[in-house]
Image: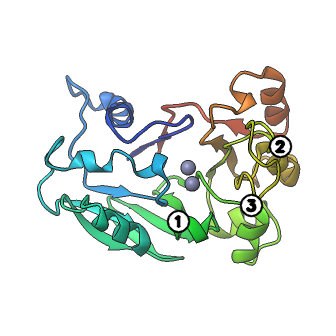
Amino acid sequence: MRIILPLSLRLNYGTSRLRLWAKSTSHLGEKLPIISPISSVTLTHIHLGHVDGIGQFGREVMGASNGSIKLISSKPVIDEMKKKSYLEPFSPEAITNGSKVELGKGVSLEFWRVPHREHEIGETYGIVVRGEKKSILFLPDHDTYKETLDYHKMATIKDWLKSISVDVALLDGTFFTVDEVAGRRSDAQGIPHPPIAESIALLGKRIEGIDPEIIFIHLNHTNTVIDDEMKRLQIQELGWKIGVQGTVWEI
Ligand SMILES: [Zn+2]
Ligand SMILES: [Zn+2]
């Protein structure tokens, strides 16, 4: 089983993301990269960058047959997709905090709710993809570690990651600092994502053999780590990483 890192920079759901996935299957010996069959789609939450393009599975573009793809997400997301008439190709499966979904071939998904602008968009989840060899947490969006850790009754990020038992954690790295987006309030309310500078201060140094691999993803175009070598070094020296688009793991 292979899993690819889908968004270290932001892509929409359409052809670019599927092409990236298809590229990761080229080792299977196909002459042309394959994009099918897609058996399930999982959504963390309803923010535009995570759902735009979902309509392309429908009749106008891919023409997936009715109910042929499992859509795994929270009830508010599924309800919203229904309102927009995007549900036709999907058979929805609603999850809540702690839900587990078996995908077959030794791969399962686990869902952990995280506070993320709930008054605007409803529920958001971090997803653990658990394979036979490796487990990976996908957490592209949440507001603050304080709220997330309080919700899960954990004292530190490392404690939480240990409790959900993951080898790799792909964590929200949207911004490096809260003040990098001009015109936005430079506090946690203005930009509800934990900035990398704060996350690495909370994490401290990686302890080899004990801590999981942590990779920051979901980088906004304003994020200075994209081209600031010093900031990258600062992260690497602590033992953490910045995501690279198209990274592939065997799980
Ligand atoms: Zn979001
Ligand atoms: Zn996002």
Query: Which x, y percent locates residue 162?
Result: 70, 64
Dot 1: element: helix
The residue positioned 57% from the left and 37% from the top of the image is 8
The yes-or-no answer for disc 2 within 8 Å of ligand 2 is no
The residue positioned 39% from the left and 36% from the top of the image is 17
Q: Which residue is mark 1?
A: 121
Number of callouts in the render?
A: 3
Q: Colour scheme of this structure image?
A: rainbow
Q: Would you call the spot at circle 2 few (<14 residues within 10 Å), some (14-19), or many (20 or more)?
A: some
The yes-or-no answer for disc 3 within 8 Å of ligand 1 is no
Q: How far apart are the two marked residues, 2 and 3, measured between alpha carbons?
A: 13 Å
- Asked whether residue 246 is in view, the answer is yes
Q: Which residue is mark 2?
A: 197
- Classify residue 20 as left or right of residue 248: left
Q: Which residue is mark 3?
A: 144
Query: Which x, y percent locates residue 155?
Result: 82, 71
Tag 3–tag 1 contact (CB < 8 Å): no
The residue positioned 71% from the left and 37% from the top of the image is 241
The yes-or-no answer for disc 1 within 8 Å of ligand 1 is yes
Q: How far apart are the two marked residues, 3 and 1, measured between alpha carbons?
A: 16 Å
- Classify residue 14 as left or right of residue 224: left
> In terms of image quadrants, where is residue 216?
top right
Tag 2–tag 1 contact (CB < 8 Å): no
Above or below residue 165? Residue 197 is: above
N-terminal-most mark, 2 or 1: 1
Badge 3 amino acid: Thr
Badge 2 amino acid: Ala
Looking at the rendered image, the disc whose residue lies closer to the viewer, 3 or 1, is 1
Dot 3: element: loop
Badge 1 amino acid: Ile
> In terms of image quadrants, where is residue 244?
top right
